[in-house]
Image (cartoon, helix red, strand yellow):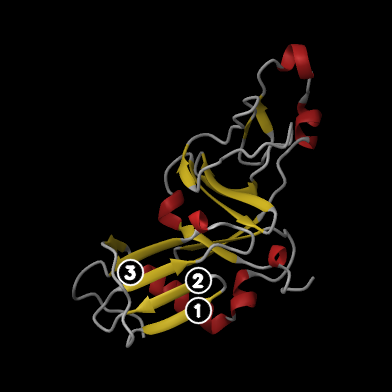
Amino acid sequence: MTNDVPENRWFHLCMADDLASPNAFVTTRVGAVPLVAQNIKGRVVAFRNVCTHRFAVIHGEPSGCGPLRCPYHGWSFDADGVPVGLPFNPTDFQLEAEGRRRLALHPASLARCGRLVFVRVATDGPSLEEELGSDLFVRLAALSDAFPRRGDAVEPEDDWERIEAANLRLHLAPDGALVLHSAAPPGADRRFSRTVTFHPATADAELPA
C-alpha cells in the first residue's frame, strides 16, 4: 500500500465536538469515494457514504444531524453498518439476519488525535500516529485539547506559527488563538473544506509549547 494514493491516506475531517451528539454526522469525499462519520447511539463510526441497496449517497450535506438512512428507499443502518430498517422487507426483500449482514455498509477507517478526527478510505494501513510521526501527533493532540473554545473567525497573520499535517493547516497566534483550516481532500469540492478559530478555555490557561 502506498501513501501517494489518496484512498490510502488519512485526512482530517472535523473535531470530536462535531460528532458528540446522537445522530450527528460529517461527510467528505476522497477521490471518487464519499465518506461519512456518524454518532450512532454514542458510537462514532465511519463508512462509505453509499447505500448498499441501490448505491445512492446517504447523507448529501457536509454535516448535520439525522439517522443513517438512505433517502432513496429509506434503508437505515446501525453502528455496524448493518441495515436494520428496511421498509417493505417482509414483502419485497425477505432479508433475514445473514442477508442483512451481507448488505452492510463498507467500513472506513477513523482515528482521533486529541480532539481532531481523521478518516481514511482504506481499512488497512499505517495508523494515524505512524503516518504523521509521533512528535507531530503528540503536538497536535496537545494543541487541540488546549484550545477547546470556538470563537469568531480570525485572519492569521504573517508572524503566527504554521503547522501542517495531511490536509490540515494550523495557525497559532502568539497571544493565544488557533485557526484550523481543513482543506477538502483530493476529489472533493470546496464545500468539504472547513475553517474554525479556537481559543483557550480561560485567558490564563497554560498552553503547550
At label 3, which amino acid type do we have? Phe
Image spot of residue 96 (x, y percent)? 78, 23
Query: How many labels, in total?
Result: 3
**Label 2 packing within 10 angstroms: few (<14), some (14-19), many (20+):** many
Tag nearer the camera, 3 or 2? 2
Q: Amino acid at mark 1?
A: Glu
Give the mark, 3 or 2, whose residue is nearer the N terminus. 3
Please state which amino acid type lies under the numbered disc 2: Leu
Q: Quadrant of the C terminus?
A: bottom left
Question: Residue 164, labelled with which disc?
Answer: 1
Q: Residue furthest front?
A: 189
Q: Earlier in the sequence, mark 3 or mark 1?
A: 3
Which residue is painted at 70% across and 54% down in the image?
32
- Estimate how packed mark 1 is, as few (under 14), some (14 to 19) or many (20 or more) residues with alpha carbons within 10 Å: some
Callout 3 secondary element: loop
Measuring 77% from the left and 73% from the top, which residue is drawn there?
Answer: 2
Q: Secondary structure at mark 2?
A: strand
- CA distance for labels 3 and 1: 17 Å
- Residue 208 on image: x %, y %: 35, 81
Q: Which residue is mark 3?
A: 147
Closer to the camera in the image, 131 or 27: 27
Asked if 103 appears above or below 32 in the picture, the reply is above
Residue drawn at point x = 47 percent, y = 47 percent: 63
**3 or 1: mark nearer the eye:** 1
Q: Which percent across, then down, holds residue 187?
A: 64, 60
Label pair 2/1, CB-CB below 8 angstroms: yes
Horizontally, is 79 left or right of 64 in the view?
Answer: right
Residue that label 2 marks: 168
Q: Crowding at label 3, few (<14), some or many (≥20) Cα neighbours within 10 Å?
A: many
